[in-house]
Amino acid sequence: MVRFYDPVDEKDLERVEEILKAGGIEYFLYKEPVEKIGPQQIHVAEEDVPAAEVLLMKGKTRH
């Protein structure tokens, strides 16, 4: 697993989780090691990073 995304807040975390779930990308959440940066880091399998990036970019264009 590699770090994929650092959400800025809970709303951003929920948005990215929804995108990854809808795209069938498995992910894990890790507590952010530095306080006040964001709630948790999103990690995905290294081989899923390109697909996850495409999904995230498509998700950003819809908002």
Image: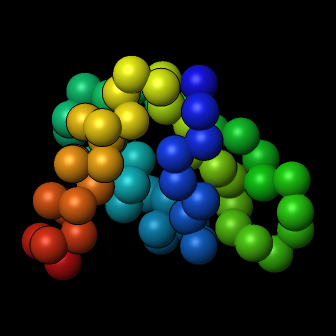
**Where is residue 18 drawn, in percent x and y?**
31, 48
- Residue at 30 percent of width and 37 percent of height: 50
Q: Nearer the viewer, residue 29 or 55?
A: 55
Q: Which quadrant holds residue 61?
A: bottom left
Q: Is residue 32 left or right of residue 23?
A: right
> In the rendering, at what x and y percent does residue 23 appear?
20, 35
Q: How many marks?
A: 0
Q: Residue at x 39, y 22 (%)?
A: 47
The structure residue drawn at horizontal position 68% and vertical position 53%, both measured from the top left corner, is 40
Check the picture and name the quadrant holding the C terminus: bottom left
Q: Is residue 4 above or below residue 9?
A: above
Q: Nearer the viewer, residue 29 or 53?
A: 53
In-image side of 38 versus 58 (left or right): right
* Location of residue 15 (image quadrant): bottom left
Q: Nearer the viewer, residue 11 or 53?
A: 53
Residue at image location 69% in from the left, 67% down from the top: 38
Measuring from the top left, give residue 24's x and y in whole percent.
25, 27
Q: Is residue 15 visible?
A: yes
